[in-house]
Image (cartoon, helix red, strand yellow):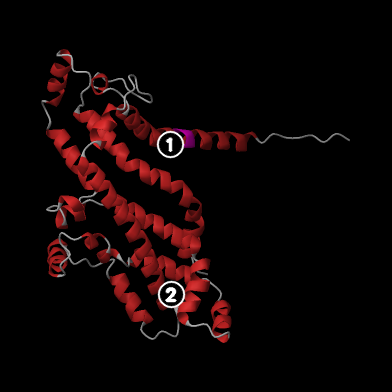
Amino acid sequence: MIKKTYVNWENIIIDLFVYIILIVLIIVTLYPFLNTLAISFNDALDSSKGGIHLWPRKFTLYNYRTLLARKQIFQASLTSVARTVLSTFLCTFSTAMVAYTLSRKEFVLRKFISFVYVLTMYIDGGLVPTYFLIRSLGLTNNFWVYVLPGLVSAFNLIVIRTYINGLPDSLIESARVDGAGEFMIFFKIILPLCKPVLATIALFVAVDNWNAWFDTFLYNSANPQLSTLQYELMKVLQSANTMTGSLMQALSQAAAGTAHTITPRSIRATMTIIVTVPIVIVYPFLQKYFVHGLTIGGVKE
């Protein structure tokens, strides 16, 4: 007996509609980045004519050589990398330690301290009092102003604490029966089981620190050695916006026979790619932890 198969056209049409929407969203999301990438690799004068979309019309590395040849860009890159690595490690580790402490039911002050941390999410000290506090602590023109003020985040603390609360209490109880102390339990049991949520929080902290520039402007703008890559990008973008005569100067240089030149548009595109690519490279390695880490850390049955 031959079985008849029926095609569910309604599901096919819905799936096709969903796929079309996703493709459109991908194009809308990727096009600005790919367009900026094409302009950064295109000849500056040729880019000023317009018409650059997804591929450079006149390929060149002159834009990158010009910017990367600046000593300040190299120094700012080192500062940004050092800041991101140290802040990510210390902030994730410190927040995990506080979260484990506040997850223990036998800790008497856990509710009060948790309330104080949550309160900081709604009440801010303000820009001026914060600046005076940082200055009184001697952290102005100091590298550690990038690391110490953000060691423990209330939001990250809540996520990690909720994740730890979802772990079986029998694991900790059995470790205590075997004679393990709190530090042994934290390092040997809690940290290995919290890898998904810790990886998620680490990426959050890394992105925040890599993209930050306002704290450099407030506290370390007087010291060029402590400038960050994002702060240099901000200065480059500001200078590019005020370079009204740069394009005419570039055209006159080209007419005089100068082989290469650079324009405000090419500066903006090149600098944007320089500060964006590192975090784009790191993101795929930690993406797999996102859904698992946030779901378990944000939902408690």
Which mark lies nearer to you, 2 or 1? 2
Q: What quarter of the picture does the N terminus occupy?
A: top right
- Amino acid carrying label 2: it is Tyr
| Residue at (33, 67) in percent of width and height | 154
Which mark is drawn over residue 129? none
Q: Is residue 149 left or right of residue 4?
A: left
Against 52, residue 77 (above or below) is below
Q: Is residue 37 left or right of residue 286?
A: left
- Amino acid carrying label 1: it is Leu
The residue that label 1 is drawn on is 25
Residue 300 at what x, y percent from top left?
A: 49, 68
Span of residues in magenta? 22-26
Against 238, residue 50 (above or below) is above
Q: Nearer the viewer, residue 229 or 224?
A: 224
Choose top left, top right, bottom left or bottom right for residue 85. bottom left
| Residue at (32, 31) in percent of width and height | 36
Q: Do we see residue 233 in this rendering?
A: no
Residue 189 at what x, y percent from top left?
A: 53, 73
The residue that label 2 is drawn on is 100
Magenta span includes 196: no
| Residue at (43, 48) in percent of width and height | 283
Against 244, residue 200 (above or below) is below
| Residue at (48, 72) in percent of width and height | 187
What is the chief secondary structure element of the magenta stretch? helix
Which secondary structure lies at badge 2? helix
Residue 218 at what x, y percent from top left?
A: 15, 56
